[in-house]
Image: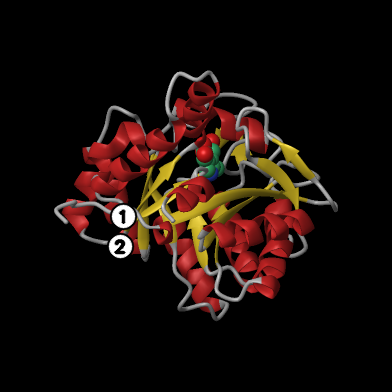
Amino acid sequence: MVRETRLDPDDFIYPLFVRSGRGVKSEISAMPGNYHFSVDRLVQEVGEAIEDGVRAVILFGIPDHKDAVGTAAYDDGAPVQSAVRALHESYSDLTVVTDVCLCEYTDHGHCGVVRDGEVVNDDTLELLARTAVSQARAGANVIAPSDMMDGRVGAIREALDEAGFESLPILSYAAKYASSFYGPFREAAGSAPQFGDRKAYQMDPANSDEALREVALDLEEGADIVMVKPALSYLDVIRRVKDAFGVPVAAYNVSGEFSMVAAAAANGWIDRERIVLEILTSIKRAGADIILTYHAREAARLLR
Ligand code: PBG
């Protein structure tokens, strides 16, 4: 009766990786229990997740071809766009969030267009906007830009409005740190930068005043939900953002955070079920309304 924080499966967004083909379900070695799915197998997985109590998913695409400008990101027939259509055909009240970024789609692995060894912010905006509109046309319910280019929320908002998607919400990865906790995801998405790092566009883990400035900018540009990422080393940032703005806040319990738990549990060093619920509770207690987590299915099951 006196418990202050309660987890609910409605809090979770379940991240999934989708690629082309049929009948594909191949495990990501650094993220046991997570897979690359072809669209048909993805539909199956999501059906089972819904039975467990999951109500929302976020999709990441694994393209067949990568090039310098991430063409596959804004191809209407690409795996993510096809998956959104297929999921809506099968499940009427599922929320489908789509990640907008170029790093999974560029051969150099950066989140934007590269010129003379540098990511060019403003040239990237148009491609991100095009990606968002293509995902919206496929039926995405929430657009989630993760690239961290300056001005991308405004650019995406404008493009969505022009295309007739005025009421489609934007969940912006607003305070996204240049973190080592993304390692397993980069293996999963084959998106590790081929040169340099992401420190020019992602944030320094040492800063939290800057996180508030990043969030303020994204809200001004039209973000409806703001995200802090990663979650666990940044619980203080989640709390500051929630207190300062009072808007819906999401937190991304990222791949490295997931894989550490999975590895320790596989060795019998920790009690996986209790740790998962403790971790997710702490993220919610810090102020997150929404948690993106690879534990979504198991946590939803545990909460039943
Ligand atoms: C793409 C993106 C990344 C993640 C989500 N979207 C990787 C990155 O910035 O390198 C990481 C998610 C995770 O680690 O679970 N920009």
Q: What residue sits right under mark 1 in the picture?
A: 217
Residue at x 51%, y 46% (from the top left corner): 298
Mark 1 is on which residue type?
Leu
Q: Is residue 162 above or below residue 205?
A: below
Residue 120 visible in the picture: no
Q: Residues within 10 Å of mark 2 (few under 14, many from 20)?
A: few
Q: Is residue 98 above or below residue 176?
A: below
Residue at x 64%, y 30% (from the top left corner): 187
Residue 266 visible in the picture: yes
Q: How far apart in space, not on screen, are marks 2 and 1 (Cα)? A: 5 Å
Image location (x, y in percent) of residue 6: 28, 54
Residue at x 29%, y 41% (from the top left corner): 282
| Quarter-of-image position of residue 35 | top right
| Quarter-of-image position of residue 39 | bottom right
For the N terminus, give its image quadrant: bottom left
Image location (x, y in percent) of residue 3: 19, 51
Label 2, secondary structure: give it: helix
For the C terminus, give its image quadrant: bottom left
Color theme of the render: secondary structure
Mark 2 is on which residue type?
Glu
| Quarter-of-image position of residue 79 | bottom right
Disc tally is 2
Left or right for 8, reference 76: left
Q: Residue furthest bottom?
A: 164
Mark 2 lies within 8 Å of ligand 1 (Cβ measured): no
Label 1, secondary structure: give it: helix
Q: Residues within 10 Å of mark 1 (few under 14, many from 20)?
A: some
Residue at x 28%, y 27% (from the top left corner): 206
Image location (x, y in percent) of residue 146: 49, 48
Q: What residue sits right under mark 2 in the picture?
A: 220
Q: Are marks 2 and 1 in contact (CB under 8 Å)?
A: yes
